[in-house]
Image (tube, rainbow, N blue to C red):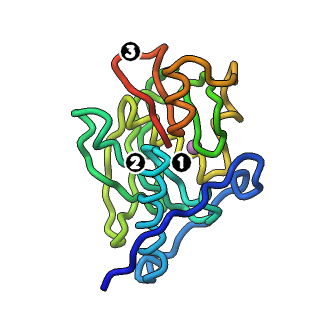
């Protein structure tokens, strides 16, 4: 019988784990049933938040791993659940500004610039290398999660950090994400 995934507590700013660089994973770690369980737990925790991305440091595990799922958000992001282990960007280009929130910084949003397009290389949960292009909401989500692995929160970079007031800001703040009120206007909250 497969183990049942369970919710993990999401830690909040100013927890020290959120402010330190996470440790690179050894591929053999992915053979550990407890690590596979942790990945399942991260999805369950992310969906419950609800969020579209969650990085291991947010559950107080300082490893270079994050999960993303934008399936529900937009037709064009039908990528399904993705696991990124030891991710890195091979391309970062363009610039886009939007507002962003974070599950570890509840109730707040801020404005910040991100690359418009990134290409990310990582290992999946089976240790297989893959590459994915991220634009728009997906691209910003990847950058938000990558920052978590480097011990950086969006509030370290953002301008005009404020309590979420509008319905859209509430959604952004409560879903740990970014939304794009100043972007294309057709993108939803990014919860990461
Ligand atoms: Ni976050």
- Dividing the picture into quarters, in which one does residue 33 lie? bottom left
31 up-or-down from 53: above or below = below
Residue that badge 1 annotates:
146
Residue 120 badge:
2
Would residue 101 be found to the left or right of residue 73 on screen?
A: right
Cα distance in 3D space between marks 1 and 3:
24 Å
Q: What residue is at 40 percent from the left and 49 percent from the top?
A: 68
Image spot of residue 79 (x, y percent)? 26, 46
Would residue 65 be found to the left or right of residue 127 on screen?
A: right
Q: Earlier in the sequence, mark 1 or mark 3?
A: 1
Asked if the residue at label 2 sits under 8 Å from ligand 1, the reply is no
Q: Is disc 1 surrounded by few (<14), some (14 to 19) or many (20+) residues within 10 Å? A: many
Q: What residue is at 46 percent from the left and 44 percent from the top?
A: 51
Residue 185 badge:
3
| Figure quadrant, ligand 1 | top right
Image spot of residue 47 (x, y percent)? 42, 51
Cα distance in 3D space between marks 1 and 2:
10 Å
Image spot of residue 118 (x, y percent)? 41, 38
7 up-or-down from 147: above or below = below
What number of labels is visible? 3
Q: Earlier in the sequence, mark 1 or mark 2?
A: 2
Looking at the picture, tell me which residue is in the foreground, 10 or 111.
10
């Amino acid at each position: 019988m497969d183990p049942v995934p369970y919710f993990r507590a999401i830690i909040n700013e100013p927890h020290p784990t959120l402010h330190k660089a996470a440790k690179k994973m050894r591929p053999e770690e992915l053979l550990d049933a407890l690590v596979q369980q942790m990945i399942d737990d991260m999805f369950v925790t992310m969906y419950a938040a609800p969020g579209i991305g969650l990085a291991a440091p947010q559950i107080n595990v300082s490893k270079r791993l994050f999960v993303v799922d934008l399936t529900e958000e937009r037709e064009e992001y039908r990528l399904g659940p993705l696991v990124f282990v030891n991710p890195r960007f091979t391309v970062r280009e363009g610039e886009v500004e939007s507002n962003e929130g974070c599950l570890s910084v509840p109730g707040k949003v801020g404005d910040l610039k991100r690359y418009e397009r990134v290409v990310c290389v990582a290992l999946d949960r089976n240790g297989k290398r893959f590459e994915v292009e991220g634009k728009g909401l997906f691209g910003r989500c990847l950058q938000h999660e990558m920052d978590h692995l480097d011990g950086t929160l969006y509030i370290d970079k953002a301008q005009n950090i404020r309590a979420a007031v509008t319905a859209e800001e509430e959604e952004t703040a409560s879903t740990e994400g970014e939304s794009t009120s100043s972007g294309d206007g057709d993108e939803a909250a990014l919860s990461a």
